[in-house]
Amino acid sequence: MLVCFNLEALPGKEREFEALLSDKGIGERIALRTGARRNMIFVKEGKMVRILEFADGTTPVPLSAAAKEDPAIAKFLHDLAPLVKEGYVAGDDRSFADFMKRVSYPLAYDVRR
């Protein structure tokens, strides 16, 4: 199963945004805590696409739940909040859930050969 998110930096916050999202260590923690077997990030000009891959039959752990278990993920989400367009209030579960709905994309198809 693939999950995709698309984020864009607020004007003037592109460098901070890209630096924060380019930290492979936090990407590894997110993959571990959410149950993803892959966590891919594409970053360019203040825009980011993240694709998480989960094994078939796996139930992904929501990022908000992973943040409650891992202080590094909580800090990452806290630091990200003021950098993104159509952002969220750090620490507010409802705000974050609404944000995730706005930035998540449903899979249209997945061609495998």
Image (tube, rainbow, N blue to C red):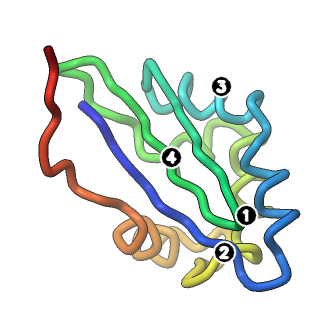
Task: State which mark lies toward you, 4 or 1.
Answer: 4
Residue 13 % position (x, y): 83, 75
In this picture, is 3 found above or below 98? above
Residue 52 lies in quadrant:
top left
- Residue at image mark 2: 84
- Proximity of marks 2 and 4: CB atoms separated by less than 8 Å: no
Q: Which of the two labelled residues, at mark 3 and mark 4, occupies the earlier sequence position? A: 3
Q: Amino acid under label 1?
A: Leu
Say which element carries label 4: strand
**Relative to 106, 68 lies left or right:** right
Q: Amino acid under label 4?
A: Arg
Q: CA distance from mark 1 to mark 2?
A: 7 Å
- Residue at image mark 1: 80
Numbered badge on residue 28: 3
Of residues 79 and 111, the one nearer the viewer is: 111
- Proximity of marks 1 and 2: CB atoms separated by less than 8 Å: yes
Say which element carries label 2: loop
Q: CA distance from mark 3 to mark 1?
A: 17 Å
Q: Which of the two labelled residues, at mark 3 and mark 1, occupies the earlier sequence position? A: 3
Residue 61 % position (x, y): 40, 37
Q: Residue at x 58, y 41 (%)?
A: 41
Numbered badge on residue 50: 4
In this picture, is 29 found above or below 20? above
Say which element carries label 3: helix
